[in-house]
Amino acid sequence: MSATTTPAQTATSGTADTGEREFVIVGRDSAAGYTLWDAAAAPTDPDQRARVLEELGVDAMDALGRVDTARGATAREAVDRLLDRLGLTLADDSDLTAYGPAAA
């Protein structure tokens, strides 16, 4: 299973924002919306990142879920960006309180 990435860009200039990092987001989309299972900072080492994404991809496929990556200053911002990109809303069973307040 391949992960998809949301590029990090500043809203005004469209250039890369160095204050952001990549997050790995694991969940499942269904008719009820997107169920978030976890979001965590991606490893910065390319080899370790590839191994993590591969292992998570296998686990997610086994659970009929998906693994994506998105950039953000926080995990919550990355999740919000992913949902916007996918055109999805969170399912009622997703709890974002562990990931901080929504981006303004």
Image (cartoon, grey):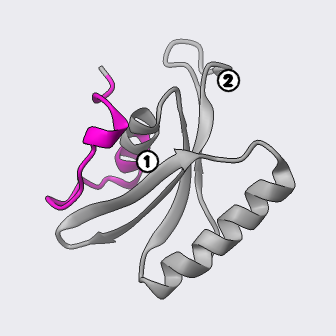
Residue 48 position, x and y percent, is: 80, 57
Label ID, residue 21: none
Residue 34 rendering spot, x and y as whole percentages: 29, 61
Vertical side of 64 occupied by 34: above or below: above
Where the C terminus falls, by quadrant?
top left
Cβ atoms under marks 2 and 1 closer than 8 Å: no
Instruction: Residue lying at the far bottom in this picture: please name it.
Output: 62
Q: Nearer the viewer, residue 56 or 16?
A: 56
Q: Which residues are magenta?
A: 81-103
Near mark 2 (Cα within 10 A), the count class, few <14, some 14-19 or many ≥20, is: few
User: Residue at the location (28% across, 28% down)?
Assistant: 101
Mark positioned earlier in the residue sequence (2 or 1): 2
Identity, as a three-letter code, of the amino acid under mark 1: Leu
Is 73 colored magenta in this rendering? no
Residue 36 image offset from top left, x and y in percent: 34, 58
Residue 19: name its quadrant.
top right
Q: Write the residue at 63% across / 20% down.
A: 17
Hey, what amino acid is under mark 2? Answer: Ala
**54 lies left or right of 35:** right
Which residue has dot 2 on it?
16
Query: Residue 82, labelled with which disc?
Result: 1
**Position in image of residue 14 (x %, y %):** 60, 21
| Prevailing secondary structure class for the magenta stretch in the rendered image | loop
- Which residue appears at 42% of the width and 56% of the height? 38
